[in-house]
Amino acid sequence: MALFEYQVKTPAGRPIKGKLTATDKPAAMDELRKRGLTVFSLIERKTSLLQIDIYIGNPVKTIHFIIYCRQFATLMRAGVSIVDATRILAEQTDSKPLRKALQEVGSSLRRGISFSQAVQEHKRIFPPLFVSMIRAGEESGNMEGTLERLAVFFEKQHTTTEKIKSALTYPITVGVMAVGAVIYLLWAIVPQFVTMFESMNAELPAITKMVLALSKSIQGQWYYWILGVLLLVVAYQITKRTEKGAYAIDYAKLKVPVFGKLNQKGSIAQFTRTFSSLYASSVPILQSLAIVEEVAGNKVVGRYIRSAGDSLRQGKPLSDPLKKAWVFPPLVTQMIAIGEETGALDTMLSKVADFYEMDVENTVDRLKSLLEPLLIAFLAGIVGVIVAAIMLPMFSLYGNM
């Protein structure tokens, strides 16, 4: 996907500037024309390693967005106009960024701009999936059903994401505690035994020499350690913002022991749930695949989704390239193939999403019960090695006495 900057004019004659993501320039031009806009300028924005925008994420919390979709659907079902519903929700929401965006959307609606075009101007608040499904809802006249489907989608996505986060929180916490305990021991405790070991005039065990050298390095050259950590963080951030680097990182996430399978299941759940929601809302399938590729949450999965879209453009089944992809188990590809043959692709995708969302939840519960004793043993082992390094020479000294 490429980023384009455009200058257009609405049917009412109002000039607009903005940004748009599309596969190429003709696709971006078609997208703008579908909105009824007259294009004056469309320029692809080139980015280099030093010019990459820093994406700071959606400032609206998922729970606020879910509530917004639910309330919006309720107001639409009650017969409230989009303009009034937008005004009411802008007054009620607890999210300041969402409130500001809705106020601007309301102003656009009063000038005669469609709701999908109005929210398209606030990309950081309203994701592409939301905009595409809203546009499809406008065309089909089923806005309330689309909004309900969006609320369900974001609820399930939020639940799956939180489950994966909860599985990662415990090992990260224990890891931080382990690093803190090691630094404290090497900085404050080990140096107190250095003088005593020097006075022993005895050959120290290898493990004791290693711990003493590490302690001396942390005390005397701590700035090098901090600089090293900062360089690693910077290198990671730079790598993550390059195409090859991001792909390598996401590949590693899928291959890492224990958590790789969890990340894979989470990506599959994200892919199938998003694709199902878009397809059920009558969003064109190629456009749906382009959106799913962006929100899959993993570059490896996204690349296989792109190949599936290329296959579809050539008149081949969607499931064929996915069958060759190691990230998609046979269950997923078989269900997609059945959905293509029966014309119930959205139903099959929804069933797969339900299965993997439940599987993620069960996997997280198992991991928590398994990791807790292992990580405690790991923390105790690290501290035990340092304590043993201090105590071994003392035992040797007492033995000689």
Image: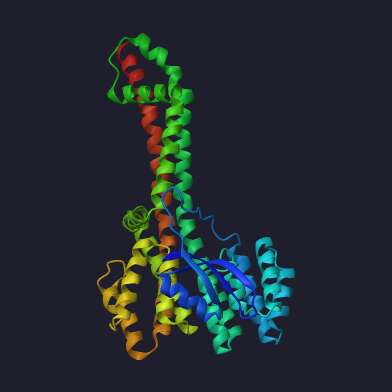
Residue at left 58%, top 77%?
A: 116
Q: How many labels were placed on the picture?
A: 0
| In this rendering, position of residue 127 left or right of residue 377 | right
Of 108 and 163, nearer the camera is 108
Can you see residue 365? yes
Q: Is 175 placed above or below 227 here?
A: below
Q: Quadrant of the N terminus?
A: bottom left
Question: Given the current orientation, which residue lies at the most extreme bottom position?
Answer: 342
Residue 149 rendering spot, x and y as whole percentages: 54, 79
Residue 352: % across, % down: 39, 77
Please report the residue visible at 29 percent of the width from the left and 82 percent of the height from the top: 317
Residue 89 lies in what quarter of the image?
bottom right
Quadrant of the snapshot with the C terminus: top left
Q: In this view, does 86 lie to the left or right of 290?
A: right
* Above or below, comparing residue 118 to residue 400 in the picture: below
Which residue corresponds to the image point at 61% horizontal and 77% vertical from the top-left? 10
Is 399 displayed left or right of 287 in the figure? left
**362 is higher (above) or lower (below) than 335:** above
Q: Quadrant of residue 35?
A: bottom right
- Residue 268 location, quadrant: bottom left
> Which residue: 40% across, 43% down?
235
Residue 204 horizontal/vertical position (percent): 30, 18
User: Most extreme residue toward the left, as rendered?
Assistant: 324
